Amino acid sequence: MYKKPQLQMKNICYCYDGKNEVLKNVNLDIFAGEKIAIMGANGAGKSTLFLCMNGVLFTEKGDMIWEGEKIIKKNRKQLTKNVGIVFQEADNQIIAPTVLEEISFGPMNLKLPQKEVQKRVYSAMEKMGLTSFENRITHYLSGGETKKVTIADCIAMESKMILFDEPHTALDPFHQQVLEDMFQKLSNEGKTLVISTHDVDFAYRFAERVIVFYNGSVIADDTAENVFCNKEVLKKSNLKQPMLLQIKELLAQKGILKNCDIYPKSIEQLKQLL
């Protein structure tokens, strides 16, 4: 049965100076509940894509369609309301002095009743483990805590899709794992997750679908296994194979691994194959 896309991008182009296009005829269909990794070298157009998807930037060329409704300037709030974004530098995203005020800001701007705002805010704080943080000064939060708050912002807005721009930046291994656990929880709740990252190992083990950009255009859009086995795409986009794939190929070459049609996504899965 045909499943309609949640967000469609048809021939999307964008340029900042009116001359040089940062995005060039991008065509993508994103479906509800997907876990997608957006990859590519610096300057490939990933961050600009996110700003267009979120409605911060309005595309003059091409069509953005949200749940069957074409986005024009008058209704671009449909994107802002439904597509949350967590920027690479989360500190720059925080605007309120306390955690409670920060998470309340979005729902209040929707002009919701006070009880509904409180319900959304406290539910978001509980999901993100921030219930004891409501009076904390946002300026003094750690990098991991700031990420949590910005994700709670999206949850309180009840965003159906959440975009993460290089979310692992400046996080230590412990907080990277905490963040990935959050991703899985959000996915289990049915959120659509689109994550821009240079971390091939993370993209391979987490994403169901990998989209690779090169010079403003999509050069690959497939399963993580297929993309990371495409040596031509990896070379063109300055990406490398995930470590587990490299180990799998080496074991297969040595005749140690017999079943080459299975792609382990974790060390435990690799142990089971062996």
Image (cartoon, helix red, strand yellow):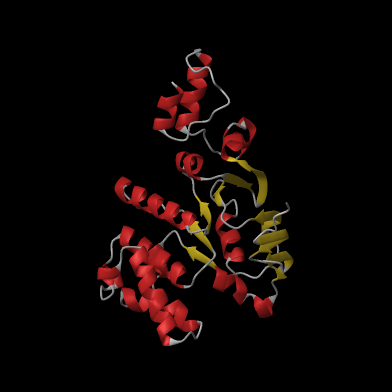
Q: Which quadrant would residue 52 be assigned to in this image?
A: bottom right
Residue in front for this viewpoint, 177 or 220: 177
| Left or right of 223 on screen, residue 272 | left
Q: Residue 127 location in percent, x, y?
A: 37, 64
Q: Is residue 43 above or below residue 59?
A: above
Q: Position of residue 117 (x, y in %)?
A: 42, 81
110 left or right of 58?
A: left
Taking the spot 35% from the left edge, 47% from the top edge, the residue there is 177
Q: Quadrant of residue 30?
A: bottom right
Residue furthest front as drawn: 1
Q: Residue at x 28, y 65 (%)?
A: 141
Res 204 visible: yes
Is the residue 100 above or below the residue 221 in the image? Answer: below
Q: Is residue 171 left or right of residue 274?
A: left
The number of discs equals 0
Q: Is residue 27 above or below residue 80?
A: above
Residue 27 position, x and y percent, is 71, 54
Residue in the picture at 52% in, 33% down: 241
Looking at the image, the residue that sits furthest to the top is 255
Depth check: 255 or 196 in front?
A: 255
Residue at image point 44% right, 31% down: 269
Residue 78 occupies which quadrant of the picture?
A: bottom right
Q: Could one spot residue 96 in this view of the protein?
A: no
The answer to which of 126 and 78 lies nearer the viewer is 126
Q: Quadrant of the C terminus?
A: top left
Q: Position of residue 211 (x, y in %)?
A: 61, 47
Q: Answer above or below: position of 4 versus 207.
A: below
